[in-house]
Amino acid sequence: MKYLFILGRNPELSEAELKYYFNPKIESKDKEILILETDKLPNIDELGGTIKIAKIISETKDLEEMEKNILSTELFAYSSNKPFFYITDYNPYYFEDIENIIKYYFKKNKFKAIYKKPKSKLKKTSPTELIKNNFPDNCTELIVYKHFIAKTIQVTNPFLLEQRDELRPCPDFLQSISLRLAKILINLTGIKQNQVLLDPFCGTGTLLQEALLRNINVIGIDKEKTMINKAERNLKWLKKNYKINNYHKLYTSLCKELSTFIPQNSIDAVATEPFMGPYFANYQKEEIIIKTINYLTQIYQSLFLELEKILKKDKRCVMIFPIFISNTNKKYYLDLRKILTKKFKIIDSIPYYKPGKMILLREVKLIEKIKL
Ligand SMILES: C[S@@+](CC[C@H](N)C(=O)[O-])C[C@H]1O[C@@H](n2cnc3c(N)ncnc32)[C@H](O)[C@@H]1O
């Protein structure tokens, strides 16, 4: 089956998530639009980087054929008596034609739907708008991209994420990663249900909570006792409010001491946004950046010495690395040759952009412990 995926604000990272999560056959990509083929479609709630999934119902340039394809598709759930109808158009070339076909469809089927005409031709219908109008039961969207026409079948529900983010007892909007990024990092590890995932810089436990929701056992480490207490409260809240059968273990510790309490070869995956140095509000001088990089290198080096012992062979550590930009606009990277032991190899590296001032860039590295 062929699908059109609308990706989130980091398309490269979203695409990598799909590749490592279910390895679809990608036919084409164009910024946030991906056309792919798969017979095992994931549930969009499992993905952090996909906004909409739409099934391709027509891919012909011939207008008559296009009309036939649209008219033979079941566009509306017939239980709904006055559904909403949207067209999201990524290429206004066919817009009027499709609009006319749909109007004809309504008339022919004596169907009453509320057509929500986009304010401008290129206006995209947001998931929020669709969910508010009770998607999919009471709401249909067609996505038009080049000559492809696709019917939206899954939409991310921003309200569920917001709720989970805001209602937990100890949210930490400053240091914590977003739920979406947490899901992406977990999916990039390739971990399976009931295996064990470690976050060695767990903070208030955002990444751990998203893993628990996916039936994964989790271990979280943080050097601050206050952080571990907050993570414990958050995860207890999660277990009370969601159906979770897997275990969580939390330890106050430096990451250089992991192997003193975690058994050898017992971890199936590591995913983390680590400590990335002090918060900089402005571009810094070279000396300060080099000092920060040296400090971080030591911490990360000690982490990988420990991961060599506790991570199973062939398994992955997915970690965000900082890239610093100086006041002379020069980029500074950490040298991974100094950080990784010989037992690790980098298998992929993907840039990750955060909105706002670009003082600190980030890249996500997929690092595998080799088999030997
Ligand atoms: C960016 S936050 C982590 C965010 C977290 N991964 C999440 O899911 O939201 C970094 C955390 O690393 C902790 N930390 C800093 N240095 C550490 C070290 N050497 N060992 C373990 N934890 C450390 C800090 O206390 C802080 O809570």
Image (tube, rainbow, N blue to C red):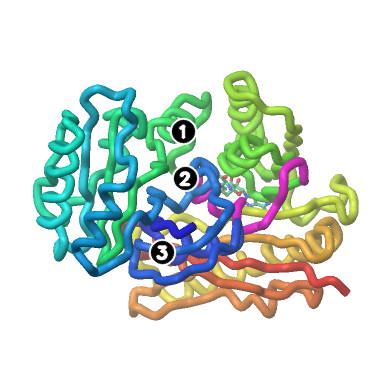
Place residue 275 in its image quadrant: bottom right
Q: Look at the image and tell me in which quarter the C terminus lies.
A: bottom right
Question: Mark number for residue 165?
Answer: 1
- How far across and down, in percent of the image, does residue 155 sit? 39, 42
Number of labels in the image equals 3
Look at the numbered discs 2 and 1 and tell me whether their residues touch, using CB distance below 8 Å.
yes
Of the numbered discs 2 and 1, the one sitting upstream in the chain is 1
Distance, label 2 to label 3, CA atoms, is 26 Å
Distance, label 3 to label 1, CA atoms, is 31 Å
Type of amino acid at the residue the image marks with label 1: Asp
Nearest to the eye among marks 3 and 1: give it.
Answer: 3
- The magenta-colored residue range is 176-195
Of the numbered discs 3 and 1, the one sitting upstream in the chain is 3
Type of amino acid at the residue the image marks with label 3: Ile
Q: Is residue 189 magenta?
A: yes
Establish if 220 lies above or below 160.
Answer: below
Q: Which residue is mark 3?
A: 35
